[in-house]
């Protein structure tokens, strides 16, 4: 995995007004050591990160000043400028928090002056009249309240002004939002306004919770100026709560604010639960409600409110009141019960998904509040909230109804609710035994009776295990582990099942360890959790085995690595006792899967002792040649994969890999071949990386010994074993490329050789590579790779070509000029073959000669003087020049073929097919990086000629290869009814062909033989001319291939309109 580049911190620089800048310059001293000089140097910087250093020096500099410095006008002015800087910074700027943190350490004798400066600047901020600047002011108020002593003191001094500003800003922003909605304005502006409202509500709540004045009762007199502002804000929040045009997040936060303000303002506090209960139950006694509450919350006291508003009031009740330790007394307990009954009523009414989400969170919040109050509640409340109560029954019903809800977040809330219900019942049990408790016993049995395809069952059982322990569930049904493992064949249930199993076996192990002193408990644990796993691995279906290996087995081994020996022991015994079928994975497959998973996760080292203690060499070889492909793959994965990329490959592993390659290159399954090649590439990467460790050891550059048994050997000995192993592997792979070898064998061998060339590249500099494939390439092997171009499978050609490109050796080293000339001539000859794969072979040969700079010197005649070769050319320039020469040569031959086709189309089909040449041109152009051409002036006439040549080909083959419909419509109907239907289709698609072949439907004659004279007559009647007017070509299809018999036609798509091509069916009769 690549290393993620560390992101550079971006900090906006702080600035000051021009007037303040001049003030700092006037107070700065010559030595530059006073506060004014420090601030001047700071604000003159353009980079915010650099300014951090200066901000940190402000307080230390002031600490060196004595108390007389308070009267210094320079310091007073600097403190005033600092206040202005603080309020000018955005809330997200790190410099703002840094400045606040630094000023918290300001010497006490400067506090009064600093508070005065911050207060005066905050007052200026509060006088802002621009509605779209309100957000900045609100953010500054919020910042002042956040761990900033000077800011909090400033807000205290201007509390009335701050409350009035919040009231004004919320009212004006709400009105602006209505105007935007009314005129269908900018949605971005509307979103911004909604967000401003939300922030304003939150800051209002923060004020009430943090400002010191609100902790006292002096402001609660009706004559207090603060009281009126509080009532005004409460009235605004009440409006927001019922306003359906606002976001539900705003309504939800308003519900919190309403309860918080009522809690803060209402006297006496003992009556708050009763008041809120009456609000929730819509039973407010107007004679007992204060006048200020009626005026501010009239809609809550008198009118019917929407269900959403009632829901958010419930949320505010649970979140804003203190439920801890039963501080609200009996009234609090009654309020808790009233709240849940209101929520049950709303549950049956709410249908909107977002409100359902809110309801689930609020029910979860209610269970949390119930747990807190139950810890010190009255016996009557415990009776109302035990597991057998109607409230818990309704909540369980809610869980069962919603535990498979489509929303992930809602399903998560049902899990929390269920978990809290179990804890609530425990708090009401009064010391009763969990095992015999009827509620837990009945709940466990009812869950186990449910079908295992219900996903919510797994979540609830997991919570039950964490609450009462797995031993009580196993006492009811000890086959639960086996039942869960059996359903792991269904992909959608696998994550739930594996998580539940992990919870269960962890809980069981902890319980057994605490109950049993000796080590006999491990046998019971293995019998419960490991034995069912081994049974599935041996006897389960394919999906069960795959999912258990991927999900459950790693979790089990990560938690209990020592269980591996138990697995190996049981499976070895099973292998010895029962041979089983060679066609099934059986115990041997299970053994290899367990060992592979253990090694991949770091629970198995490759040391010789470990191999001998766990599994024998004969068993490994048995797995490597097992008839079931997955057993072979798992065994190979055991040898190749490791949790450490630098783990040294042992001699035994290298021997087994050679043994595997000897028998497994000819796999007929594409998936198996892919896995084999991938695993061997991992092994090669391990060899490469561990070799670097060995090189460092050999050179004395590393003080750390590798964590491997091979430290007993000299590094040079291990490196030599690596070289010998890689050479042996390459020998086996090249031997597999003998003439006539199968496609699967060639594919595997070439892919593995390509991985070797990729993992062990040719590197410049001092980097040492333990092996290079090029050193084992001789003329014979080079010729073997070239002969792979003759394969009828294009994948083999591609792999051989890519491998040759990765080698550091070139064709020039193994082939003389005469042989290279022969290769080129063979490619030209193949390009005119009537066999489909011959022209593909030709294209690979030509590209090979181009990229190896092995084109015959005779082609230099196609170069102009400006494109002549020079010895110092870069590889890209050489490739471009070689491609240029080859394409010109091909076009010259193609031009002759076109001339022959213009004279006789039938003779061209038999002796001068054009598709091969075109295919070679196309492949050469595809390999060429067209965006980095240097010979642009030389390419221009070549491309022009190629276009004209394409149009000539299009014209000459148009009689037999033509169709303008995307479906490849061919007019071959033999009855008038079909022809009439075809005519309708032709009128609809309006073909753009100019040779009038498709202007009307034609009825073809039915005949048993083919008359050449009829064909000649029909061809002569078709206009094959090309009408060129200026730069506009009437021919819409640019055909670049005249198909010979049995070859699928191809097209080169050039700029402009074009249509698809099809081969006329009657031309398939030629042989």
Image (cartoon, helix red, strand yellow):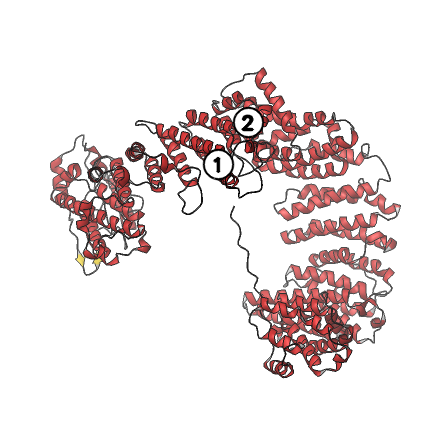
Let me know if residue 255 appears in the view. Answer: yes
Q: Of the numbered discs in the image, which one, if any, rests on residue 592?
A: 2
Let me know if residue 454 appears in the view. Answer: no
Query: Closest to the observer: 864 or 471?
Result: 864
Q: Decide: few, some or many residues near mark 2? Use Cα within 10 Å; few <14, some 14-19, many ≥20.
A: many
The residue at 40%/27% (across/down) is 666
Residue hosting label 1: 687
The residue at 76%/38% (across/down) is 467
Residue 784 coordinates in the image, percent (x, y): 30, 32
Q: Decide: few, some or many residues near mark 1? Use Cα within 10 Å; few <14, some 14-19, many ≥20.
A: many
Query: Closest to the observer: 951 or 945?
Result: 945
Query: Closest to the observer: 666 or 223?
Result: 666
Classify residue 793 as left or right of residue 226: left
Question: How far separated are the C-alphas under marks 1 and 2?
Answer: 22 Å
Residue 140 appears in which quarter of the rendering?
A: bottom right
Classify residue 209 as left or right of residue 1020: right
């Amino acid at each position: 995995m690549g290393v993620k580049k560390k992101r550079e911190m971006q900090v906006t620089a702080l600035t000051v007004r021009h007037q303040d800048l001049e003030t700092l310059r006037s107070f700065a001293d010559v030595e530059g050591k006073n506060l004014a000089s420090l601030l001047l140097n700071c604000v003159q910087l353009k980079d915010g990160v650099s300014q951090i250093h200066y901000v940190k020096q402000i307080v230390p500099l002031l600490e060196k000043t004595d108390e007389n410095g308070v009267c210094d006008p320079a310091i007073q002015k600097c403190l005033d400028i600092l206040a202005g800087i603080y309020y000018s910074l955005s809330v997200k700027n790190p410099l703002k928090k840094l400045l606040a943190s630094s000023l918290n350490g300001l010497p006490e004798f400067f506090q009064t002056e600093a508070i005065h400066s911050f207060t005066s600047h905050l007052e200026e901020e509060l006088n802002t009249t621009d509605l779209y600047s309100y957000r900045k002011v609100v953010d500054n108020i919020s910042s002042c309240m956040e761990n900033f002593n000077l800011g909090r003191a400033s807000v205290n001094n201007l509390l009335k002004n701050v409350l009035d500003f919040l009231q004004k800003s919320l009212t004006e922003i709400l009105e602006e939002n209505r105007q935007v909605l009314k005129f269908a304005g900018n949605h971005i502006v509307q979103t911004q306004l909604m967000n401003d409202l939300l922030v304003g509500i939150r800051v209002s709540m923060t004020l009430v919770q943090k400002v010191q004045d609100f902790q006292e009762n002096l402001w609660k007199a009706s004559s207090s100026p603060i009281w009126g502002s509080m009532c005004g804000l409460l009235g605004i929040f009440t409006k927001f709560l019922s306003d359906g045009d606002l976001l539900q997040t705003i309504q939800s936060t308003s519900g919190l604010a309403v309860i918080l303000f009522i809690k803060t303002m209402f006297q006496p506090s003992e009556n708050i639960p009763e008041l809120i209960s009456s609000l929730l139950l819509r039973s407010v006694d107007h004679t007992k409600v204060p006048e200020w509450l009626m005026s501010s919350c009239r809609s809550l006291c008198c009118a019917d409110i929407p269900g959403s508003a009632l829901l958010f009031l419930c949320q505010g009740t649970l979140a804003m009141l203190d439920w801890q330790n039963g501080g609200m007394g009996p009234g609090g307990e009654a309020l808790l019960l009233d709240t849940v009954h209101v929520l049950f009523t709303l549950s049956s009414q709410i249908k909107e998904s977002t409100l359902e989400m809110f309801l689930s969170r609020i029910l979860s919040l209610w269970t949390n509040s119930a747990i807190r109050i139950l810890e010190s509640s009255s016996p009557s409340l415990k009776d109302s909230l035990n597991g057998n109560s109607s409230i818990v029954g309704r909540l369980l019903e809610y869980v069962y109804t919603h535990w498979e809800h489509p929303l992930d977040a809602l399903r998560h809330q049902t899990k929390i609710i269920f978990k809290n219900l179990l804890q609530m019942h425990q708090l009401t049990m009064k010391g009763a035994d969990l095992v015999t408790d009827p509620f837990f016993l009945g709940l466990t049995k009812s869950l186990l009776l449910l079908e295992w395809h219900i996903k919510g069952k797994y979540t609830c059982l997991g919570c039950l295990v964490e609450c009462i322990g797995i031993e009580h569930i196993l006492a009811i049904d000890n086959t639960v582990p086996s039942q869960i493992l059996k359903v792991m064949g269904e992909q959608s249930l696998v994550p739930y099942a594996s998580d539940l199993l992990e919870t269960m076996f962890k809980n069981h192990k902890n319980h057994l360890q605490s109950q049993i002193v000796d080590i006999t408990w491990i046998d019971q644990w293995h019998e419960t959790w490991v034995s069912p796993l081994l049974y599935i691995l041996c006897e389960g279906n394919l999906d069960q085995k795959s999912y258990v290996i991927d999900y459950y087995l790693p979790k089990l081994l990560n938690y209990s690595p020592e269980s591996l020996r138990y697995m190996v022991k049981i499976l070895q015994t099973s292998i010895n006792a029962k041979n089983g079928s060679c066609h099934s994975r059986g115990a041997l497959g299970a053994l290899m899967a367990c060992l592979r998973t253990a090694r991949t996760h770091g629970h198995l080292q490759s040391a010789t002792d470990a191999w001998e203690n766990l599994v024998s060499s004969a068993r490994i070889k048995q797995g490597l040649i097992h008839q079931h492909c997955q057993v072979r793959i798992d065994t190979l994965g055991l040898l190749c994969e490791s949790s450490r990329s630098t783990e040294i490959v042992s001699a035994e592993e290298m021997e087994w890999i050679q043994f595997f390659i000897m028998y497994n290159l000819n796999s007929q399954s594409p998936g198996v071949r892919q896995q084999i090649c991938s695993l061997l590439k991992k092994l090669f990467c391990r060899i490469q990386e561990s070799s670097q460790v060995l090189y460092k050891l050999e050179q004395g550059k590393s003080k750390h010994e590798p964590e491997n048994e091979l430290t007993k050997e000299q590094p040079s000995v291990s490196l030599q074993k690596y070289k010998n192993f890689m050479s042996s592997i390459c020998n086996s792979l090249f031997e597999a490329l003998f003439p006539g070898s199968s496609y699967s064998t060639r594919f595997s061998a070439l892919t593995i050789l390509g991985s070797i060339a990729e993992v062990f590249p040719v590197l410049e500099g001092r980097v040492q590579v333990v092996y290079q494939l090029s050193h084992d390439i001789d003329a014979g092997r080079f010729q073997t790779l070239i002969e792979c171009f003759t394969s009828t499978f294009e994948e083999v050609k591609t792999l051989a070509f890519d491998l040759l490109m990765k080698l550091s050796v070139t064709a020039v080293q193994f082939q003389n000029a005469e042989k290279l000339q022969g290769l080129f001539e063979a490619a030209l000859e193949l390009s005119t073959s009537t066999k489909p794969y011959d022209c593909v072979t030709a294209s690979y040969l030509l590209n090979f000669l181009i990229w190896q700079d092995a084109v015959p010197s005779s082609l230099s005649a196609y170069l102009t003087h400006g494109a002549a070769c020079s010895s110092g050319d870069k590889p890209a320039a050489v490739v471009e020049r070689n491609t240029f020469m080859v394409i010109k040569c091909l076009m010259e031959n193609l031009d002759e073929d076109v001339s022959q086709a213009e004279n006789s189309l039938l003779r061209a089909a038999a002796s001068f097919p054009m598709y091969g040449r075109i295919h070679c041109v196309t492949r050469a152009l595809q390999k060429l990086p067209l965006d980095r051409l240097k010979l642009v002036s030389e390419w221009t006439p070549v491309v022009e000629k190629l276009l004209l040549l394409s149009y000539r080909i299009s014209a000459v083959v148009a009689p037999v290869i033509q169709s303008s419909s995307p479906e490849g419509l061919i007019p071959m109907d033999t009855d008038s009814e079909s022809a009439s239907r075809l005519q309708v289709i032709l009128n609809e698609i309006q073909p753009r062909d100019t040779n009038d072949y498709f202007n009307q439907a034609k009825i073809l004659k039915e005949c048993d033989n083919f008359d050449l004279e009829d064909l000649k007559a029909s061809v002569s009647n078709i206009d094959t001319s090309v009408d060129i007017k200026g730069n506009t070509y009437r021919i819409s299809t640019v055909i670049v291939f005249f198909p010979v018999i049995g070859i699928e036609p191809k097209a080169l798509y050039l700029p402009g309109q074009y249509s698809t091509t099809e081969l006329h069916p009657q031309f398939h009769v030629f042989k």
